[in-house]
Amino acid sequence: MSAAAAVRLGVVHSRFNDEICGLLLASAQAEAVRLGARAEYVAVAGALEIPLALQWLAQSGRFDALVAIGAVIRGDTYHFEIVCNESARGVMDVALQFGLPVANGILTTSDEAQAVARKDKGAEAVRVAVEMAQLRRRLAEGWS
């Protein structure tokens, strides 16, 4: 049994930019399996909905760490900046409010090619979440 086997992950992924988010999700799922982590997956409409779903998962108390997966691609309007900034702020707010590791795997790119080139960021986010959950456990054990 791997060290990650006992880690319970909640993964929230966006459906917006579905092709790219599907690649990110597939890499995250494969990494969770590879690490032996238990993961539960929740789909939401877009990057702005991710923080609220993360908050609900955090409130459940069932997870050791959370993962956010999405893709925001620059368009012709200021909306890109709003979505990037507010989704990142919301992800960090959940982590700090609940003292729970939340790995941010929401891509913010200028175009689709950049996003596709970063499809393995889903796996990277899972690795970060598992690492942080394990660190939290080790620190808590040191306090006992």
Image: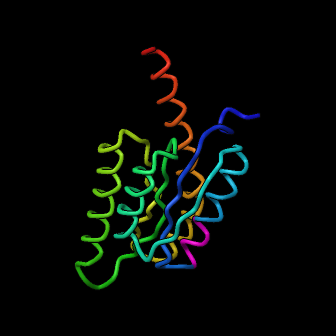
Q: Which residues are magenta?
A: 19-24
Where is residue 47 shown, x and y percent of the image?
A: 39, 69
Q: Residue furthest front?
A: 60
- Residue at 36% x, 46% y: name it: 95
1 horizontally vs 18: left or right = right
53 to 80, vertically: above or below: above
130 to 123, vertically: above or below: above
- Residue at 26% x, 70% y: name it: 81
Quarter of the image holding residue 54?
bottom left
116 horizontally vs 111: left or right = right
141 horizontally vs 99: left or right = right
In depth, the one of 124 and 45 nearer the eye is 45
Quarter of the image holding residue 86?
bottom left
Quarter that holds the N terminus: top right
Q: Residue furthest right?
A: 1
- Report the magenta stretch's main SS: helix
Where is residue 3 shown, x and y percent of the image?
A: 67, 32
Any magenta on residue 26?
Answer: no
Where is residue 13 shown, x and y percent of the image?
A: 50, 66
- Residue at 32% x, 58% y: name it: 88
Quarter that holds the C terminus: top left
Render colour scheme? rainbow
Any magenta on residue 20?
Answer: yes
